Image (cartoon, rainbow, N blue to C red):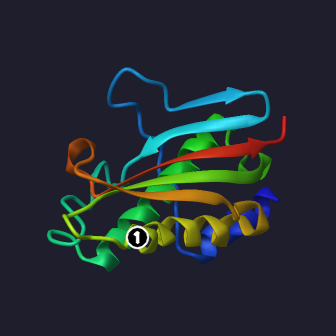
Amino acid sequence: MSDTIDGRLKTMGITLPEAAAPAANYVPYVISGNLLYLSGQLPIEGGKIAVTGLVGTDVALADAQRAAELCAINILAQAKSALAGDLGRIARVIKLNGFVASAPGFTEQHLVINGASNLIAGVLGDAGKHARAAVGMAALPLNASVEIDAILEISL
């Protein structure tokens, strides 16, 4: 399956970055049994937050969806690091939790997080279909517009 995942990434024009180091006192992932818990990932591209501000005033919906895609790319990068480079060990994405820095009155968080859901399903196929939450927040770390964490089932 890993070859298929690599092929899908290549077809989509995605090169996974190196997994980002934690920005505070936490670890980027925890493996417990056959579950991989990934800490929240920000829309980092080229070593910096690519999309900042509140969605609905500072950030347009399409830009927020791109931020969610970047979070998903960083989720895959962290998973690759946790799994010694073998994304084929992902049996199923169980859940994504999406957090959107939202202006008052903005209610399309679900559409923002679709950016991540669509990318994950596109890369992982059926294993990428997941449960999720899409929640509005007053602010996120480093003024990021989106943050997403994940729970994955992995083969041991």
How many numbered dots are placed on residues in this image?
A: 1
Asked whether 83 or 92 is in front, the reply is 92
- Horizontal relation, residue 41 to residue 3: left or right: left
Density class for disc 1 (Cα within 10 Å; few <14, some 14-19, many ≥20) is many
The quadrant the N terminus occupies is bottom right
Q: Is residue 148 above or below residue 19?
A: below
User: Quick one: which residue is furthest to the front in this view?
Assistant: 105
| Residue appearing at x 52%, y 61% in the figure | 15
Front residue (pair 124, 55): 55
Position above or below: 55 against 33 = below
Give the amino acid type for the residue marked by disc 1 in the picture.
Val
Q: Is residue 102 above or below residue 84?
A: below
**Which quadrant of the rendered structure holds the C terminus?**
top right
Q: Is residue 97 left or right of residue 109?
A: right
Q: Quadrant of residue 126?
A: bottom right
The image position of residue 78, as x and y in percent, is 55, 42
Secondary structure category for the residue under label 1: helix
Q: Residue furthest left?
A: 58
For residue 24, which quarter of the picture? top left
Disc 1: which residue: 112
Q: Nearer the viewer, residue 132 or 150?
A: 132
Q: Which x, y percent locates residue 102?
A: 25, 61
Residue 21 location, x and y as percent? Answer: 41, 33
- The residue lying at 70 percent from left, 69 percent from top is 7
Outermost residue on the top side: it is: 25
Q: Is residue 42 left or right of residue 14?
A: left
Residue drawn at point x = 67 percent, y = 60 percent: 130
Residue at point 20%, 62% (across, down)? 54
